[in-house]
Image: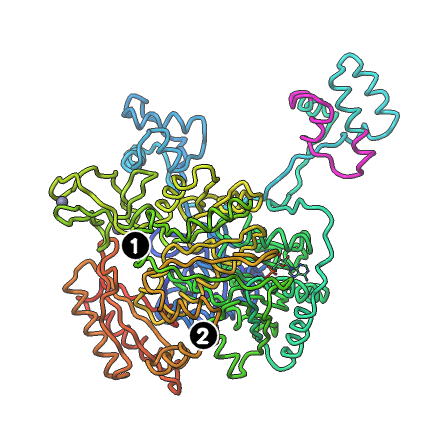
Amino acid sequence: MRYYIDVILPIPIEKLFTYEVSENEADYLKQGMRVAVPFGKKKIYTALVFRIHNEPPSLYEAKPIDQLLDEAPIVSPTQLEHWLWIADYYMCTIGDVFKAAVPSAFLLESETIITKNDKFSLPETALKDDEWLVYEALQHQPVLKVQEVSQIIDRKNVFPVLNRLLDKQVLYLKEEVYEQYKPKLVRYIRLAPPYTSEDRLQVLLNELNRAPKQKEVVLNLFTLEAATRKPIKVKELEEKAKVSSGVVKTLIDKEVLQEYHLQVDRVQYAGHETKASKVLNEFQMEALKQIDENYKKHQVTLLHGVTSSGKTEVYVKLIERMIAQGKQVLYLLPEIALTTQLIHRLQDYFGNKVSVYHSKYSVNERVEVWNHIMENNTKAQIVLGARSSVLLPFTNLGLVIVDEEHETSFKQFDPAPRYHARDAAIVLAMMHKARVLLGSATPSVESYYNAKLGKYGFVELNRRFGNVLMPEMELVDIKEKHKKKRMNGHFSDRLIKEIEEVLSEGEQVILFQNRRGFAPIIECETCGHSAQCPNCDVSLTYHRYKKQLRCHYCGYHIAEQRSCLSCGSLELNTKGFGTEQVEVELKSLFPKANIARMDSDTTKGKYGYEKIITAFEQHEIDVLVGTQMLTKGLDFRNVTLVGIMNADNLLNHPDFRAHERSFQLIQQVAGRAGRTRKRGKVIVQTYNPYHQILQQASMHKFLDMFTDQINERKQYKYPPFYRLIKLTFKNRDYQKLHEGTNWFSTSLKNSFGSNVLGPEQPPVGRIRNEYILNVLVKIPPKRSIKEVKTTIRKIKKSFEAIPQYKAIRIILNVDNY
Ligand code: ADP
Ligand code: ZN
Ligand code: ZN
């Protein structure tokens, strides 16, 4: 009998691949374990075992696997089922999901290893200089990596040298896989066994009379051990005995002391005692009661609670109960910027039961969190994470909280899998028979509609905690202000006056501008030219601080220009403005205030957000200028004024969600004002103060917004009534792209008629030298979405078989945002 395994490879191929294994291996392997397998000519990949069986593949000869990598599965059965659902629903491959889900340390890559050939016999003079350097290095170090050779000969491309050496039979090349995850080890120290008895210790101490430092070390170790009865770290001992590491080393060499290593987690909660959670007020209590009622009938409940109504404290109560039952809780957040505050809040209540999982953590840290979840350890009973944490190996999930459920960043845009974390979380919860709580002050039109239909349970919290009033909103007409010369740069007299007042009261201000950089465009006053990105159809954004013009799509940048690139004129002017400019103007308007900026340019690095948020919390900053990353869910006690610098660029998106999003954004930014003590104020600067959405947002009229939007969506056939699949076509050749896309959309129209829109060029029609065209398929309410997808897949297959269209890339985006 022969044995085979079907495996998932971390690459975008449709099918599972089959490899041959021995009977022993077949016996040992389980679904969810990793194996290293050869693929293509030279590559070795990490693959995930999916099925073990006896059927040889019919189309190819199964190769044997390279090696086994795990002792136990790293992926749980439910998790795998969920990944399959994602691949199917979002029309990508299971390999895409596998690759996105696991920390990269789990995906071993093969690496070329260079070893010396001991039989090499030519005289050394037969080697050229660079060859000799490598040869020389191999005499000292039996194994070299490509990277190391590159450093030795100080050159990027090392393969010419290696090939020459290979010809001269100086060395061997070999592919090898290696484990990237390295457990973090800490050095501990103890007395070597002969000295643990008291008599021997006494003898030792006498012997050490002539080496007072060494004696000091032994005495200190003895006291530390007696006092703590726990393993003693080498470092701890050195500090206590006030000696250098050399002294300890001498004792280890003399075999008086013994060192050993223990594995520790990289992320450790250093906090102290946990606190009891807060006592809920009557409204929160009522909400909690209703949530419980709802769970009798619904798996998913939507909590619509105005900003600062105390939703988080209600979540905390639900979490408490879940973990008392030994269940796991997933707490999803749209942005890692938010975790900073929330992690502290949750750790106060739950201590080291909280684990965080997001992209700013190192791969090693992520592996540790992953393993804790897989093993259902209490250390990761509550997982706080962004989007990708729905892909983690939960084994016993009881509750999913999706905070700020309306946020569009829950939808992955690029690369595949293009999944919506909220929707994927609901499916995951179903598989675990777990509950879901969606929370928001401004629910998405979709979720609110589902609640209205009775698909989801629905609970409201209508007042702010402590009865603080909702902030007062003032719309300032900047067209009018410009006319009357009441603008100072981009600040209206109203906004300036309010900032003055707030600062004089010792309170804080948040200013919001939805663009980073200094100005989106620098335009020549003489000829109208503005610098464009050579790779994308977009103007370069001016970053004054870095003295650069940058493309926000591809990262291309050039130094700031003093004169027009086209006509040489010195009269250049900026158009539009970003956070940098707000900051600069603010500094000249309020020279005494402490001003800081929070956008993706200032929050690089693991603690980028944390530093700014903490400084603001501790009032080292008076005014914080930022993009939307500072609008969501943050809880600052002392902010009483929020300024929206320009509400119009929110409204002008060519997108059916633009109005819904503007409403949400304005309400959310406004929600940062006056959260705990006195009523806050929000100044909204706009050219269109009578715009419906601005009116609704400024009067906190969520229901009006919802009703308008749902009617429009119905009329124009958009979600939640119609489902959308967006197809994006990309190619460097504009003509070919047009032809190919037309072929595809014509085929789609044959099946779906007028429910196919496009091809249409997006606002930025070329990015990184690739032209882009979109086609939108709308799926009517009664039509089976499965069948539609099958048809699209079929058309795609035929399309890919046409030779001249081969190079056109197709991106499928289901439920596109
Ligand atoms: P939301 O999540 O709805 O925006 P939060 O849960 O952040 O609101 O609550 C707003 C503020 O009110 C926070 O500072 C929080 O600590 C405080 N708060 C909420 N509920 C209570 C409570 N029951 N007791 C004391 N303080 C509370
Ligand atoms: Zn010019
Ligand atoms: Zn570009």
List the residue tagged with mark 1: 484
Q: Amino acid at mark 2?
A: Val
Q: Which residue is mark 2?
A: 445
Q: Residue furthest top?
A: 210
Q: Quadrant of residue 115?
A: top left
Question: Foreground mark, 1 or 2?
Answer: 1
Along the line of sight, which residue is nearer the eye, 546 or 662?
662
Characterize the local packing of mark 1: few (<14), some (14-19) or many (20 or more) Cα atoms within 10 angstroms: few
Magenta stretch, main secondary structure class: helix
Residue 37 at least partly seen = yes
Q: Where is 77 relative to 176, above or below?
A: below
Q: Secondary structure at mark 2?
A: helix
Crowding around mark 2 (Cα neighbors within 10 Å: few <14, some 14 to 19, many 20+) is many
Residue sitting at 17 percent across and 66 percent down? 804
Precedes in sequence: disc 1 or disc 2: 2
Q: Residue 716 location, x and y as percent?
A: 32, 80
Quick one: which residue is furthest to the front in this view?
A: 484
Which element is circle 1 on? loop
Query: Could you tell whether 321 is left or right of 500 in the image?
Result: right
Toward which corner of the image does residue 166 lie, by quadrant? top left
Instruction: Identify residue type, mark 1.
Output: Lys
